[in-house]
Amino acid sequence: MLTINPDEVPPKGWKGLKQYWKNDLTAALSVALVALPLALGIAVAAGVPPVSGLISVVIGGVVTTFIRGSHVGINGPANALIVVAIEAIDKLGGPGESGVPYAMAAFVMAGVIQLILGMLKLGKLANLVPAAAIQGMLAAIGLIILGTQIHTALGVESEANSTLGMLIEIPKNILKLNPFILFISAACLLMLICYPKIDNKYVKYIPAPMWVLFIAIPLYYAFKPLSQMIGKESWMVIDENYLVQIPAQLTQGLFFPDFSKIDQPIFWLMVVLIAVVLSLESLVSSKAVDKLDPYKRKTDLDRDLLGIGVASIVSAFLGGLPITIVIARSSVNINHGAKTRWSNMMHGLIVLVFVVAFSAYPFCCLGCNFNFCRL
């Protein structure tokens, strides 16, 4: 953590941008390098097109910056979103019918609820929620994510339709795991475990998720021909199916809100679930960011609800995911010297530039045409 005199608080507004734009730009670049792969991973895990995650990063950066009450927090898609998105898609979809368009409509209405809560200045109600309840909710979310993603780490797919079923399936799927995918998963997990213990400023300047990409992508391309050469069974072979596919046309495959189920109780149940879970995570994360801020500035929780509400509405109408304050990317932002709210907007614009610029070329800077490894 940077040691800064709390009395030298950066000015707000355009004056802060003029004075600290270099600091904010440096921090924003680091955050963008983290946000890009995480957004793709969250979108895939949530069961929506990968581009939806990128849309939410851009909207979260550009739209919320002008409304929200946070100073150095970063807005974008969060891990908790995976759980509520999966639930909404599953409950709102029908036989042979994708639930994603209806989930997008639920995201819009959840944003409207957040907007109303902010206008009514109810953000401080988060202080009334017991810490144990929030910790329990986050622990449950973590368990659900574990149940859904461990199969991907093993290189297999789960046939279960519930979290409990996915957890029960783990022993069975271990017996038919893909050894190459498991090795990549283990290497990436080891990097995440060891990263906090590494005391090297050059290593630490590159965020852990980027190191994961630096490990996963070369290993994938190294193992691909090897698996095809020695793999006697199809389940041992790794190919493009293990990569996140980003279409050449960024709007291809996107889903837009369908409000035809707005008169059904299950729709409103999902709306309330999404609004409550994401609002609580955002408000709790905002308070955590305040503790990390070297200037000890306090977030206006009511304005934060307004900001994420408006951004979630815009994002969902464009086919993106809802927006929250994300603690991990906010921590990267602070530790890399961000001073004002403008770093949030800059990180969204940088991701937008990455997507637009590199999608026009056959290969991106990582040599994989934005096909980031699912791990």
Image (cartoon, rainbow, N blue to C red):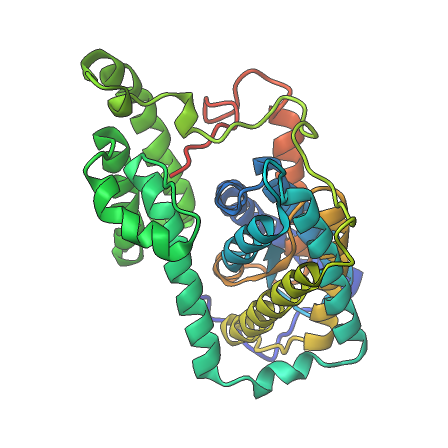
Residue 65 placement (x, y as % from top left): 72, 58
Q: Would residue 317 be seen by someone viewing this image from the given angle?
A: yes
Residue 270 placement (x, y as % from top left): 64, 61
Image height of 194 relative to 37, above or below: below
Which one is nearer the viewer's eye here, 227 or 203?
A: 227
Quarter containing the N terminus: bottom left
Image height of 49 relative to 131, above or below: above
Image quadrant in which you'd find residue 64: bottom right
Q: Would residue 12 be seen by someone viewing this image from the given angle?
A: no
Residue 126 placement (x, y as % from top left): 60, 81
Quarter containing the C terminus: top left
Q: Count the numbered circles shown.
A: 0
Q: Residue at 67% across / 29% down in the picture?
A: 250
Which one is nearer the viewer's eye here, 293 or 254?
A: 254
Q: Residue furthest bottom?
A: 128
Image quadrant in which you'd find residue 213: top left
Q: Residue furthest front?
A: 95
Relative horizontal placement of residue 259, taking residue 212 as reference (left or right): right
Relative horizontal placement of residue 273, taking residue 142 as reference (left or right): right
Residue 310 placement (x, y as % from top left): 77, 59
Which one is nearer the viewer's eye here, 306 or 287?
A: 306
Q: Residue at 28% across / 14% down in the picture?
A: 225
Q: Residue at 48% across / 42% down in the picture?
A: 41
Q: Residue at 29% across / 28% down in the picture?
A: 219
